[in-house]
Image: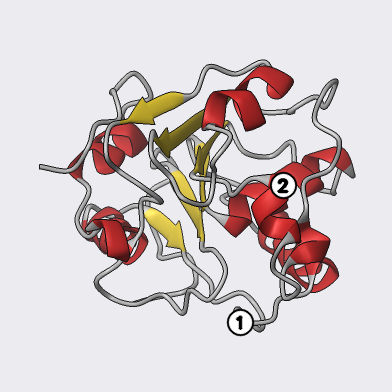
Amino acid sequence: MPTTPSPTSSASPAFLVLHGWQNRRPEAHWQHWLADRLTALGHSVTYPQLPDPDTPSLEAWLTELEGLLADFGPAASERVVIAHSLSAVLWLHAAARDLPGVTAPDRVLLVAPPSASVVRSHPEIAEFAPPPLPGLRLPTPTHLVAGDDDPYLPEGAQAAYGTPLGLTADLLPGAAHLDLDAGYGPWPSVLEWCLDRTARLRVRP
């Protein structure tokens, strides 16, 4: 599974896939599945292992993200970021700090960001607690999707993130944290969304 962009034509989109806490990119996870499918279609895909996923550092992850964005699809027809769980919160920190390159993507998908209360309850990731959200300007068209029963988002995606950010959360029934424990696994509709921004995200079959 390549972790650096694969060569494509200049007319092809590029994708940056960012994982969450304790995720070492297992092959069964939907993000690995997605990266494989997009690569097989000839698209440029970057799916990096972020530093120390069990005990991550916010500053280290931001530094890594800045480097990834500096090299992100300069000749691509479209640049798309797909961030799951803790990396969805990482993206909000990047936007709040106006991280260099954060304006590069053409669209962003935030999948199942954990709530501030949950993040703060885990010492290993407490420093990732979201920045102040009301008034935070997201520099790129952003789509927010989460399970309607996510145990890591007890306040609900709309209340915790959608309303403060001016987004309408796409709530998937029974999808929990959209992780392997919830059966995600292959997730066909996220591939459809990557290829067509108008596609609707749905629960897996």
Name the foreground residue: 37 vs 187: 187
Query: Exactly how many numbered labels are in the figure?
Result: 2
Residue that extends furthest to the right in the rendered view of this protein: 97
Q: Which residue is disc 2 drawn over?
A: 116
- Classify the position of the C terminus by image quarter: top left
Residue 139 in the image: state x and y as whole percent: 74, 28
**Residue 104 seen in this snapshot:** yes
Residue 193 in the image: state x and y as whole percent: 32, 33
Residue 173 lies in what quarter of the image? top left
Q: Is residue 15 above or below residue 106?
A: below
Q: Which residue is disc 1 drawn over?
A: 54
Marking on residue 151: none
Q: Is residue 104 above or below residue 19?
A: above
In this rendering, position of residue 14 left or right of residue 28? right
Element type where label 1 sits in the image: loop
Amino acid beneath label 1: Asp
Mark 2 / mark 1, whichever is N-terminal: 1
Q: Is residue 46 above or below residue 110?
A: below
**Residue 66 seen in this snapshot:** no
Residue 190 in the image: state x and y as whole percent: 30, 41
Residue at point 71% right, 61% down?
A: 65
Mark 2 vs mark 1, CA separation in Å:
18 Å
Residue at point 79% right, 39% down?
A: 95
Element type where label 2 sits in the image: helix
Amino acid beneath label 2: Ala
Residue at point 53% right, 71% down?
A: 48
Residue 62 lies in what quarter of the image? bottom right
